[in-house]
Image (cartoon, grey):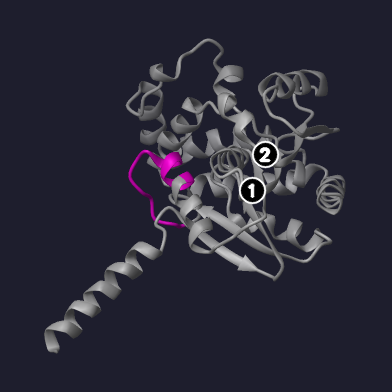
Amino acid sequence: MKALKITFLLFAIVSLGYSQSSSIKVEVIGKGNPVIYLPGFTTPGAIWKETVAHVSTAHEAHLVSYAGFNGIAPIEMPWYNTIKNELIQYIKNQKLTNITVIGHSMGGNLATHLAAEIPNTVSNLIIVDALACMREVMMPGVPADNLQYESPYNNQVINMNEEQFKQTATLMATNMTNKKDKIDDIIKWIMEADRKTYAYGYTDLLKLDLRNALSNIKAKTLILGASFPTSEIAKTNFEKQYINLPNKTLTMASNSKHFIMFDQPEWFYKQVNDFLTHE
């Protein structure tokens, strides 16, 4: 009997360890139809709380944060695929159905990936300023195999001192929002990131190409694009990248950089509400 109790206890401990994801942390707010909110690179899930407060329909919000950011312990590489797989497992474990997934930047990539891999589970998809293959825009013609974790650039980033890294973070943040009061928040999130996750995780994103998976998506989709550097250039990129995505609507935010929810909050909330209300 004692041996049986010990075996049961060990089984319970192992089961508990496997039931708690190591690559994502999820905060659940409210009741209703499930909406999974996926933030961008280095960004906390809490960034979506303002959106949650302005979504008019009652829903159960799942705010996701990622390993290596915001004080969450880092994980081994590959980073992005582990997060994606654990998100799918989380959805299955929670028995979530008829899901809306809203993702900004990298979160938009994850949202797209979920909609492609579990198409019968994701009913609505909102992609906020995310490209299916950002490498094609940032590094045209460069094959994914050319990008490796161990590279001179990644090593430089990892070995930067705090002041050097803060200069890099500041430059990036100023190009992501027009709201000066939000720049410090973005800098803080970047500075808090585990440095290897920051370098290697971004390599994962540059290698990513979801364009061939888009035709698998069944979800009704809204793409919200930022008008940076210009609305015309950005819109052309979105149209090319998502040409294989069925049942989509593309809408551009005026006078907005990457963080549309910062630069055009009222417009953003209206787009989300209109989309979900007329689903």
Distance from Cα at disc 2 to Cα at disc 1:
8 Å
Residue 122 numbered tag? 1
**Residue 74, horizontal then vertical, whole percent:** 38, 50
Residue 218 numbered tag? 2
Instruction: Mark 2 and mark 1 in contact? Answer it, CB < 8 Å.
Output: yes
View extreme (bottom): residue: 1
Q: Secondary structure at mark 1?
A: strand
Give the residue type at disc 2: Lys
User: The N terminus lies in which quarter of the figure?
Assistant: bottom left
Residue 275 numbered tag? none
**Residue 246, horizontal then vertical, whole percent:** 72, 30
Image quadrant assignment for residue 151: top left
Is any part of residue 133 visible from this angle?
no
> In the rendered view, does 42 fall on the left or right side of 9?
right
- Please name the residue shown 45% across and 40% down the image: 80
Image quadrant assignment for residue 147: top left
> In the rendered view, does 98 fall on the left or right side of 209?
right
**In the image shown, does 4 or 250 lie closer to the viewer?**
4
Asked if 18 appears above or below 112 in the picture, the reply is: below
Q: Which residues are magenta?
A: 71-84
Is any part of residue 25 visible from this angle?
yes
Give the residue type at disc 1: Val
View extreme (top): residue: 141
